[in-house]
Image (spheres, coloured by chain):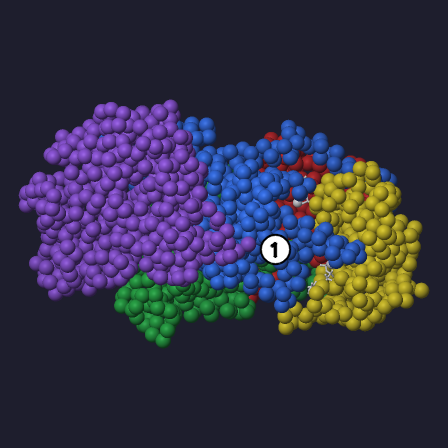
Chain colours: A yellow, B red, C purple, D green, E blue
Amino acid sequence: MSMISIRDLNLSVTAGKKTTHILKDVSFDLEAGRITGVAGASGSGKTQTGLAVMGLSPTGAELSGSIDFDGVELVGMPAKQHNRLRGVQLSMVFQDPASAFHPMLTVGDQITDHLRHHQKVSKKVALAKAVEILGRTRVPHPEEAVKKYPHQFSGGQLQRIAFASAIICDPKVLIADEPTTALDVTVQAGILRLLRELCDDLDLAVLLVTHDFGVLSSVADTIVVMKNGVVVETGEREAVITAPQHEYTRSLIESLPGAEVSP
Amino acid sequence: MTSIDQAPAAATAHSPASGAPLLELDSVACEYKLDGGGRFRAVNGVSLQLGRSEVLGLVGESGCGKSTLAKLICGLEKPADGSITFDGHPVRALGLKKRAKELLGIQMVFQNPYASLNPRRRIRDQLDDALALNPDGTWTVESLLEAVDLPADSAQRYSHSFSGGQRQRIAIARALAAGPKVLVGDEPIASLDAFLQARIARMMRDLAIDSGASMIFISHDLSVVRDIADRVAVMEAGRIVEVGSTEQIWNDPNHPYTQKLLAAIPKVDGKGFIPG
Amino acid sequence: GSGSDEAGGAGDTIVAETAFNLKTIDPHRQFEFTGSTIDSAIYQTALEFEDGDLTKPTDGLCSFEMSEDSKEMTLTLKDEDAKFSNGDPVTADDIAFSFERLQGIKGNPSFFLDGVKVKKVDDKTVTLTSEEPNPALPYILPNSSIGIVNSKVVKENEGTTDEKDGAEQFLNENSQGSGPYKVEKYDADSQVVLTANEHYNGPEPKYKRVVLRNVSAETQLTDIQSGQAQVAYDLNSDQAKQIDESMGKISSLPSTRSLYIFNNADEKIGGPAADPNFRKAVMAAIDYDKLIDLAGKGSQRMASLVPNEFVGAVPKDEAPERDLEKAKKLLKEAGYDGEKVPFHYSSDQAVNGVDLAQLAETLQAQLKEAGINLDLKPAPSSTQLDGFRSAKQPMGIGTWGADFPDPTNYNVFIPGGDVADRVNWSDDPKLKKLADEAAKAKGDARDAAYAKLFKATTDTAVWIPLVQPVSTVAVGSSIKKFVSNADISFDFAKAE
Amino acid sequence: MSIGTPKQPTNTPTTEAVRRDPVDPGLKRWQIRFPKALRTPLGFVGAGILALWLIAAIFAPLLAPFDALAQNFPRLSAPNGENLLGTDTLGRDVLSRILVAARTTLPAAVFVVICSALLGSVLGAIAGYFGRAVDEIIMRIADLVFAFPTIILAMVIAAALGPGLKNAIIAILLVSWPSYARVTRSLVMTARGSEYVIAGRLLGFSAGRSLAREIAPNVISPVVVLATLDVGSAILTMAGLSFLSLGAVPPTPDWGAMISEGVSQFAAWWIAFFPGLCILTIVMAFNFIGDSLRDTLDPHTAQEVGETTS
Amino acid sequence: MAEATTAPLGTDVASASGEADAAQRVKPPKLHPLLRFILIRIGISLILIWGVTVVTFLLTNLVPTDPVAAILGDRAAADPEIVAQTREKLGLDQPLLVQYFTYLGNLLQGDLGVSNQTRTPVLASIGQVFPASIELGIGAILISVILGLLLGLLSALKQNSLVDHAIRTLSLIGISAPTFWIATVAYFVFFFRLRVVPGAGRLDPWITPPPKVTGLYTVDSLLAGQMATFANALGHLILPSCVLALFTIGLLTRFSRSSVLDIIRLDYVTAAKAKGLPARTVVFKYIFRGALVPIITVVGLAFGSLLSGAVLTETVFAWNGLGQYAYRGATTLDLPVIMGVGLVIGIVYILVNFIVDLIYGFVDPRVRVR
Ligand SMILES: Nc1ncnc2c1ncn2[C@@H]1O[C@H](COP(=O)(O)OP(=O)(O)OP(=O)(O)O)[C@@H](O)[C@H]1O
Ligand SMILES: Nc1ncnc2c1ncn2[C@@H]1O[C@H](COP(=O)(O)OP(=O)(O)OP(=O)(O)O)[C@@H](O)[C@H]1O
Ligand SMILES: [Mg+2]
Ligand SMILES: [Mg+2]
């Protein structure tokens, strides 16, 4: 049973008189406890797919098709209702941790405000929970960390905090949009490990957006390859990487230094 | 793993031992004034040599001082300590002066393809500026564009009509047009997507070597560096911790930092193994 | 709250409005319109004008007697129970001190008693002796600049009769007069508040408090219209016309101010203006009827600079007339062909509602019809006056307000006088002779002699009299009875 | 391909197709030429109003029903069939005066803006490019000028020099160059550090050449936008000075002076009302146009421009 | 190989590089950054204030009039002896530099000279008129900040909607209308015709101003418990401050709109939305707070244009404030007044911007020195 099932998702954006089709008949599933990696060149619609699930498509966007979340239809869901799912059941982590936090609010405030809003818990309880979760995502000195501001952390630490913020309400789905692209390889490894851990421990359905096959090869269970808003290939990790079926996937992987593709 | 064999040039052929090095850095340091007062040593006692027709990869984590080093080499920052010699001439900080003729042999390709071309000038004009430096060179605007695999009509266009990868190739063409002896690439591929990175990097290497230049290729992506560099220098917190042939660094890293760095690179093998 | 229904809410306060021209209310330094308005409510003077008739000086604090040769005047303290605002009685000492202080501190009004020796004879008598005959003295003494101050208190507060005097600040804030009011609050920038002097020996004023506010003419108009103010001093005729009868009345009196064009007699500075023919052409090119129209109802022609109501005035039917043909002929004789003549005036000044800038524009247009090109040079009044005083302006608009209502006040315009110097006009034997004759004339002959002198002055066209404006006071309808005359345009103490 | 590029898959991933700029999303829009900017509704309206005013100014002598200086109508008559907008205190036709006033106001405002844009941007470019002491001196002077509210400083200067259009222009020039200096400085500073300028310097460009060839083309359009917006404020300041009788010398008709005349003639509302309307429309036109032009700049530069105009 | 590497990868790589950071710092900063920031700002402000004294001094020395004549008046100025004496008394016979230092010396003792026109000490007069302008200014800035920010926010949130277009057009009109004209028209309509507001001035003329504490009539009357006076003062304040605010409302609306638009695009706003926070929280806690920092700077700038507007507005409303005082000084070429006002306004402006910078420094945790 998949947690999220995307079927024939189409997205077009109209700005002025021009309409662009960003997603065309996109279909794939996310399953609990599994990481689904979406790969594709820049501009292929990876981020927009994630945002569509979150209900955060750009203004002027027209969405059609179906996103089934645990039996609930997300496409066309009223904004209010969607808002009740966001942050609680569906959560998201962004590419650049430095810009995903408000520079003038403390980290503690930012990772608990949705907890307080959704679960109506007191500030104190929320902070205690924050400290616990920060410990879980291995942010050093969680008690002090909640009082600090984003600029006092390194990129890797901020991404850990972002993950803490994402899981604090015990969501079912986590969308990670290129969570390691802005980080060094050494830091990336730690984040990937954390992602794997969270997925396994919390039984999350994870959508991992990236254009790095190295990352997919490390953590993804299923790989979806997109090109110009179209899904060109879906399959198990090993199969897609070692024996890509689609010519586009093959060319992508072959272009990477050190990739090993079976002929 | 067979990937080493893919490196197009054999490291030994270009060892710096053959004659005086083209570019020599002798315990160079560089300091920045910090906003809140105090100073920060971004590059600290770096000694490096670059031979002729050699590609030197410079790798290290973000903020370790790679760009600063590149700027020092081009004379864009003033060394706090040490000296840099290019082809027998000392490299001095540029300041507001016109660049000395002897130093024009060092050219740079920048990280950000969107900022490295003048948005208000035609590609042809920008290439012509560079060609003027090297009047007896063999390049023409057309041959340059062809070399970087762009249609000839690109010359009449402005940079905004090109994609990032195309822009980066124009930037490479411009650097080449000046007939450099040393081409410094400061993460020229970092802002391109992974599928383009290797391609552009390889193109840079080939063009540099074919035109008889050496190259310093800065990146934090080890796998790309491995693909094109003859030698690799590993930098950590302003210092060079290890230099060696690509093969040696890749297969037999000495310094723990290098080992850590290598270990963190995820492999595209579909095995589901998280590195590190 | 809004204005209209509160017109009566003013109670015993009278709100008067004017655009301030106020440097001080120390009477012996005060020389501007606003200061004299205030001081005339605070200070009594030795002499006064009978019912505001400027030709009839009469007893004030003192009665007076002039010697036959007009050289000695004897003042006898008359009003036994005149008291200063602190209750002190007015004495001969105070009168002598006030005169001497006026002379000694060398302020603007010091010239009033130039060449006059002050002597206290006894407790009731003070004599004023002049070297030359001084028939104008009775006309001078009613001036509020010669107000009588409480000498004891002033002396206690650094008041002296020489330049070391330091009582100005004190007098600004603590008036020392015997008039109907005293100063409650002095703010030269925004407003001056007067309250009744309970020791005043005259009839008790109905309005116990006077607020004199510094506001522009347009605000004065709206304030009178809305009942916010009871007295407005600066309305021009157009504005005065707008006042609803239900809201206020207009009291118009001939002004004691004269507007004129000056021409520099020095060829180097004056250029064409130094040529009598050119000047006469200017005089003939002006459309005086239009000027009267601009200055408003009640304004008059002038045949000389002396206001029509004064002794020595030239009858107004002798005033110059427009004659474009003549002007053009004169211009030809002068050899003038259209070169620009700089024409100076104060851009920020209005004289009894006549805006000098507008006057200049009007003149420019009129003279243009005769072929005379004026190059307007407006400047703030201080700059303009500065240039005029240093005799550097070829042509422009001048204004003169009578310091005292006597033709001798206009002698400054005759060669040898201060103002004549400003146009480099130093010599004219004919006028000199006429002036000497006038000085000797007595009684009724004086009038004719001075009229002859000033008529001859006008004929030179160095000064071209333009118009005698009308002094307009708008009085709100809440005031049922008031006194307004040539001497005091609005008497607060007598308003009801 | 002449040089040996390693064999590439022929079906290269087509990631180079036109796509979103991840770095500077506005860069493309720099290229939109100005006339296109005027196709936005506001820009269009602005251009229309301005065009009308230009026609009015150019053909004022033909359009004006009467001589603007002739005082041959009844004074203070309300708008009527003959004097469409009434007459003023001296019996002159208000409509004619308004039209003729446009002839001085518009060129004067444009002139003063051009001068201050030139002065300010040259100083700003010098400050921004050479930095250090030069920068400090120029920018501290600019700060000083900023420390005085425009009209007050202009008022003092105009009062000191004496009223007159020329002096009003000098006064406005002296107070308005700093905004150009600031914008140009910061643009030049950004450009100076930008990679294309550094690339040029590595090619051996001198400071002058790099300023003129590389930086200037990138700085000009924001300055033009700023200048367009500034014409409006120049008109306002000029009118303010005239209102305080420190502007154009009579009898030259001038809107600000007409308003000030009208203020003293409350009942004759037409004297002040129409010139005010003129100022409003013309300043609005410039602001509309400037705004649309600004929208064609990239957001960063637009903000730079926006901060100082205001 | 990679598999073989056993080098432990610390979970906290960043802190390791943080240590390196410390090692690379060759010279640690001596002062706390915030303190340093404040000190530098104070230094700059002082230099600017000094510059203001130089500018006012030089400007007024450009004036072609002879101040002595202005001081003495018509009669006394005719006497060369008195003129020479006064010149000497005022030190005007000294070289310019000496005069400047005398002026500066007097300034330091709080002596701004005496008005040529009214003989009142300039400092005392400014003490009188300044509160009037402040009262007007505070009224206007309150109105414009509240309205400007709200309208700007609304306009940005509804970008490209009808509301947005309407607000943009209105704010453009606001910054395009000549203040003195609007003031005249408003006065004519609301006072003269409709009588819904009281007339010119700060109080009805027959009302005695409340005892001076702050000089702000509204505040002082409240302090003295004079409710009627308070109501009157407030009534008088409404129209002029609204007129004065019109320009700054336009300014701030435009600026906050663009500022909010800049913020809306940022990742942290998307992140906040992705957390399912209610729109109210996203707008006020995230967007608005982010947009506020640049807006604060503009409020400082707006203050300057407010002072400019005040000159013209005060003239129309007979508001006896600094603007009118300055205008009188300028038109009568009253040099000490011009210098005094220039100095005071310069200082106020510098102070306001200093405070703005400080707020900036405090509001934004990433205190920086620019
Ligand atoms: N707000 C928007 N309005 C209109 N088009 C948009 C918007 N955001 C993105 N797009 C377009 O949608 C397409 C897909 O964008 P998306 O961000 O999903 O790509 P991506 O695969 O995430 O790329 P990258 O690897 O660069 O992040 C692109 O062509 C982009 O130009
Ligand atoms: N102008 C500057 N002022 C102060 N510090 C600077 C400046 N430029 C760089 N630094 C600091 O110097 C160090 C080295 O910077 P540099 O740009 O050389 O790093 P890098 O290795 O190129 O990093 P990246 O991979 O992120 O480009 C960093 O810590 C950086 O914060
Ligand atoms: Mg994306
Ligand atoms: Mg770098």
Is residue A251 visible in the rendered image? The answer is: no
In the figure, B269 relative to E224: above or below?
Answer: below
Residue A90 on image: x %, y %: 84, 58
For residue E289, say whether it is visible: yes
- Residue C281 sits above or below residue C176 on the image: below
Ligand 3: which quarter?
bottom right
Q: Residue furthest bottom?
A: D81
Residue E193 screen position, x and y as percent? 48, 63
- Please name the residue shown 46% across and 68% down the image: D49
Along the line of sight, the residue nearer the viewer: E361 or C298: C298
Name the residue that disc number 1 marks.
E147
The chain that hosts pointer 1 is E
Q: Secondary structure at mark 1?
A: helix
Residue C5's x, y, as percent? 51, 57
D226 to the left or right of E333: right
The residue drawn where x is 36% and y is 27% is C154
Rendered residue at 39%/39% (across/down): C181
Disc 1 residue type (three-letter)? Leu
Report which quarter residue C409 is drawn in: top left
Q: Relative to the observer, which residue lies in front, B189 or E167?
A: E167
